Amino acid sequence: MRFSSFVALALVVFAVVVGCGGEEESVTVPYLVGLKEPLAFNVAADEGFEVEVQRGPSTAGPKGFVYMQRPREGTTLSDGAKLTIWVASN
């Protein structure tokens, strides 16, 4: 009886370890448009994204502010995924 109890316990422990180790954490993309570049960068980085910054002229917002982002707000990505923000340079 002891051996079968040990086997059952070992199977339960194995199932828990395997079940917990294989899942990636998912993160929802925040809305960054309209934020100043440093704040937008920090918000995205704190959420676990790798942030890429592109700069260019824009009539959509003042200099130093985010006027576009990809992917869009509300998209669910894996932790560490790339998020690009475009910052007005004019």
Image (spheres, rainbow, N blue to C red):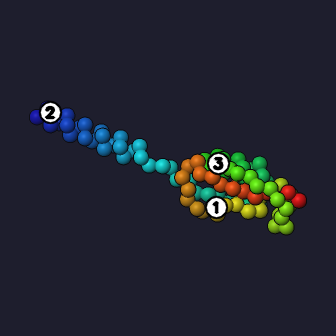
Q: Residues within 10 Å of mark 3 (few under 14, many from 20)?
A: some
Q: Nearer the viewer, mark 1 or mark 2?
A: 1
Label 1 element class: loop
Q: Is residue 16 left or right of residue 7?
A: right
Residue at x 82%, y 59% (from the top left corner) = 56
Residue at x 70%, y 51% (from the top left corner) = 52
**Which of the 4 image quadrants contains residue 5?**
top left
**Which of the 4 image quadrants contains residue 74?**
bottom right
Tag 1 and tag 3, C-beta contact below 8 Å: no
Give the vertical position of 61 relative to 5 (above or below).
below
Kindly report the distance in space between the C-alpha atoms of the residues bearing marks 1 and 3. 12 Å
Q: Position of residue 21 (x, y in %)?
A: 41, 43
Quadrant of the rendering where the C terminus is positioned = bottom right
Label 3 element class: strand
Q: Name the amino acid type tagged 2.
A: Phe
Kindly report the distance in space between the C-alpha atoms of the residues bearing marks 3 and 2. 49 Å
Relative depth, front residue between 45 and 56: 56
Q: Position of residue 43 (x, y in %)?
A: 68, 50
Circle 2 sits on which residue?
Answer: 3
Task: Decide which of tag 1 and tag 2 comes sooner along the chain.
Answer: 2
Residue at x 80%, y 56% (from the top left corner) = 55
Q: Position of residue 14 (x, y in %)?
A: 30, 40
Residue at x 62%, y 49% (from the top left corner) = 49
Circle 3 sits on which residue?
Answer: 50
Q: Is residue 17 left or right of residue 65?
A: left
Task: Decide which of tag 3 and tag 2 comes sooner along the chain.
Answer: 2
| Residue 43 in view (yes/no) | no
Circle 1 sits on which residue?
Answer: 71
Q: Name the amino acid type tagged 3.
A: Glu
Q: Position of residue 48 (x, y in %)?
A: 60, 47
Label 2 element class: helix
